[in-house]
Image (cartoon, rainbow, N blue to C red):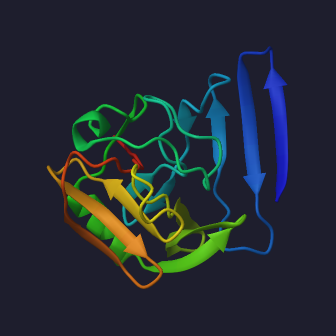
Amino acid sequence: MTKFRFNLRNVVAITICLVVGSAFFACEKNNGNENGNSSDKGVLINGVRWATCNVGAKGTFVTNPEDYGNYYTWEDAKTACPIGWHMPTSNELQSLVNSGYTWTTQNGINGMLFGTAPNRIFMPAAGISSGSYVGSGGCYWSSTESQGLFFDSGYATVYGNNKTLGFSVRCVAK
């Protein structure tokens, strides 16, 4: 991976990640603070613009697509996305699943690659906050009550779950 980082007046940092020889090409950010990304250009898949990274601290994206981000209960996840983004509906998650997916390892992290080139996103197998499924499965909330995305090396599905569990959040543009 080649990574370029430019600091402009110590206010805005621009990070461009390029992965050569891989199916993953998206990760262009405008970084509004030193603690996390406040904006993400996203990738358009089936008419929905998906963030390229998970939510870290509330209102920010993590730096790299492979970073797990923070875990949120369903109630807390509803307000976790940065301004201009929101938690996907179960229909948007289903559209992502329908776009096609491939289990892969990216920079040493297991996860699922959704979409078709060049419009793809990598979602790490972050598991849940208890530590279950870390590295072997991903659990992501939807704004549809108690619904979420689960994937492992064999499949991806949208299903109902206990909203007190801590899952990752991947936002979509408003």
Left or right: 44 with respect to 93?
A: right
Residue at left offset 64%, top offset 41%: 63
The residue lying furthest to the bottom in this view is 154
Residue 144 on image: x %, y %: 17, 51
Q: Is residue 77 left or right of residue 81?
A: left
Instruction: Classify 92 as above or below 60.
Output: below
The foreground one among 57 and 60 is: 57
Residue 147, x across and y down, in percent: 20, 57
Q: Quadrant of the C terminus?
A: top left
The quadrant the N terminus occupies is: bottom right
**Residue 96 seen in render:** no
Task: Please determine whether, in this image, residue 6 is positioned above or below residue 132.
Answer: above
Name the residue located 65 percent from the left edge and 48 percent from the top edge.
Answer: 64
The mark total stands at 0
Q: Nearer the viewer, residue 95 or 136?
A: 136
Percent across and percent down for residue 4 are: 84, 43
The residue lying toward the viewer, choosing from 130 and 113, is 130
Residue 75 lies left or right of residue 167; in this view the side is left
Which residue does the image show at 54% across and 50% down from the upper left? 68
- Residue drawn at the location 53% of the way across and 61% of the way down: 124
Q: Is 156 rendered above or below residue 2?
A: below
Where residue 60 appears, as percent x and y from the top left, is: 50, 32
Q: Residue furthest left?
A: 145
Quarter location, residue 38:
top right
* Residue 134 shows in the view: yes
